[in-house]
Image (tube, rainbow, N blue to C red):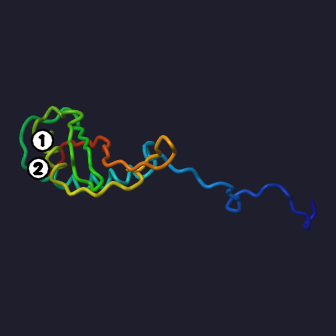
Amino acid sequence: MDGGDQDEGPIAGPRNIVEQALPVLDPELPGRGPRIAYMGAIRTRVMASFRACWAEASGPPAQRPALVSALLDAEGTVMELSLSQASGSAALDTCALEAFSAASLPAPPEALLTSPGPDGQPVRASSLRTSDLAFVPVAP
């Protein structure tokens, strides 16, 4: 090949042309979609109350994390709380549940409330079940 000839092969890198729109990420897939960021926002709001409660608590040490999940309405109001796994410390379990109840939670993102219906049209849910949040003893 002399200096003036150029290879007509494909170009790699930033010049690649995308022919189709990228697929929408399923919010239920671990590590994908808006669920991770939303659960992080919930954890941030709940942990301040949890730390304050735990600083005042006493009792036997926890044997494992307390796992709490909640049913939230479309505005982020807690409709139902459940202790998915007890920690072995009643004080820790109580603090986890009370912290969740006391926190002012953000409304879920629209992407977590909307899913395709049987006809393919979007259907908006009126509530969202959170993933389990783990609570472990923390230093005050």
Residue 91: x percent and y percent?
10, 40
Give the farthest residue toward the bottom. 4
Residue 131 higher or lower than 140, as above or below: above
Residue 15: x percent and y percent?
71, 62
* Residue underneath mark 1: 94
> In the rendered structure, which amino acid carries the disc numbered 2?
Cys
Left or right of 128? Residue 98 is left
Within-10-Å neighbours for mark 1: few <14, some 14–19, many 20+:
some
Q: Tell which of 1 and 75 is nearer to you.
A: 75
The tally of labels here is 2
Q: What element carries label 2?
A: helix
> In the rendered structure, which amino acid carries the disc numbered 1?
Thr
Residue 76 higher or lower than 134, as above or below: below
* Residue underneath mark 2: 53
Q: Nearer the viewer, mark 1 or mark 2?
A: 1
Q: What element carries label 1?
A: helix
Q: Which residue is drawn at 33% across and 50% down?
A: 39
Within-10-Å neighbours for mark 2: few <14, some 14–19, many 20+:
some
Q: Tell which of 19 and 140 is nearer to you.
A: 19
Q: Which residue is drawn at 19% across and 49% down?
A: 100
Residue 106: x percent and y percent?
28, 58
Mark 1 or mark 2, earlier in chain: 2
Q: Which residue is drawn at 21% across and 46% down?
A: 79
Q: Tell which of 123 and 82 is nearer to you.
A: 123
**Tag 1 near tag 2, CB within 8 Å:** yes
Q: How far apart are marks 1 and 2 (CA)?
A: 9 Å
